[in-house]
Image (cartoon, rainbow, N blue to C red):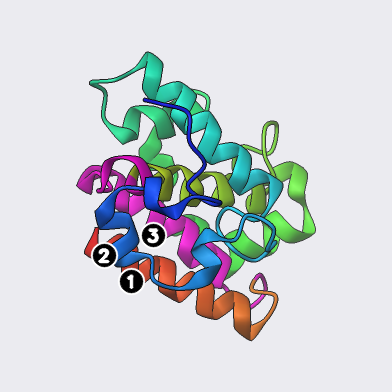
Amino acid sequence: MRDRDPFNEPETAHPRARELMTEAFFWDCADEDAPFGSDEGHDAYYEFRRWRRRNKPKPLTDCLAWIMRGVDLKSYNDDLCSDEAVARALEKPAEAFLAGAYDMFTLDATVIATSLGQLLDEGRIDAAAKPYVRVAIRRQLHPRVVTSERRREILRAIHRIVDAA
């Protein structure tokens, strides 16, 4: 994989990504609400690229398991989107899922950007990884978490793209 910057040179992204990611915010690496605009999202994309160079044939779920430090991916599920789990993550962050490694936003932003990173580079998101991306999106869309109507719009666009990819 050659070095390139799909944010400043979108023509270097996979054609399928360009087809699906039509909104300008997908290509804005300075917009904190956009998937690659936060430090977490931007770093996750480039970390995915490094991981992929070392793990060419492996599925995206292996990368997500690596991100989650070996925790069974099945633990990152819809239960984390419940009112109780979201409240706990916000009010008692030390008790949240993977609290020793991530806060809720960082983990979810990392899962989203990693998955969209596969789309940017490979033109797809592995089907087996999509349920985990949907958990991240649902948690970030929770009424206690979503920060603005614009952020809600971005998360809904991400959801549309995950379904189509």
Q: Main secondary structure of the magenta part?
A: helix
Question: Looking at the figure, which quarter contains the N terminus?
Answer: top left
Residue 130 highlighted magenta (yes or no): yes
- Residues in magenta? 119-145
Q: Choose mark 2 or mark 3, whichever is in front.
A: 2
Q: Mark 2 highlights which residue? A: 163
Which label's residue is closer to the chain start, 3 or 1?
A: 3
Of 46 and 146, which appears nearest the observer?
46
Tag nearer the camera, 3 or 1: 1
Q: Disc 2, disc 1: CB below 8 Å?
A: yes
Q: Residue 35: x, y in percent? A: 55, 57
Lower position in the chain sequence, tag 2 or tag 3: 3
Instruction: Quickly name the residue at label 3.
Output: 134
Q: Residue furthest top?
A: 54
Q: Residue at 42% across / 34% down in the picture? A: 64
Q: Amino acid at mark 1?
A: Arg
Q: Is residue 147 visible?
A: yes
Quick one: label 3, few (<14), some, or many (20+) residues within 10 Å? Answer: many
Residue 65 drawn at (x, y percent): 42, 29
| Amino acid marked by disc 2 | Asp
Question: CA–CA distance between discs 3 and 1?
Answer: 10 Å
**Which residue matches tag 1?**
160
Residue 68 appears in the figure: no
Q: Is residue 27 above or below residue 113?
A: below
Asked if the stretch drawn in magenta spans residue 141, the answer is: yes
Q: Secondary structure at mark 2?
A: helix
Q: CA distance from mark 2 to mark 1?
A: 5 Å
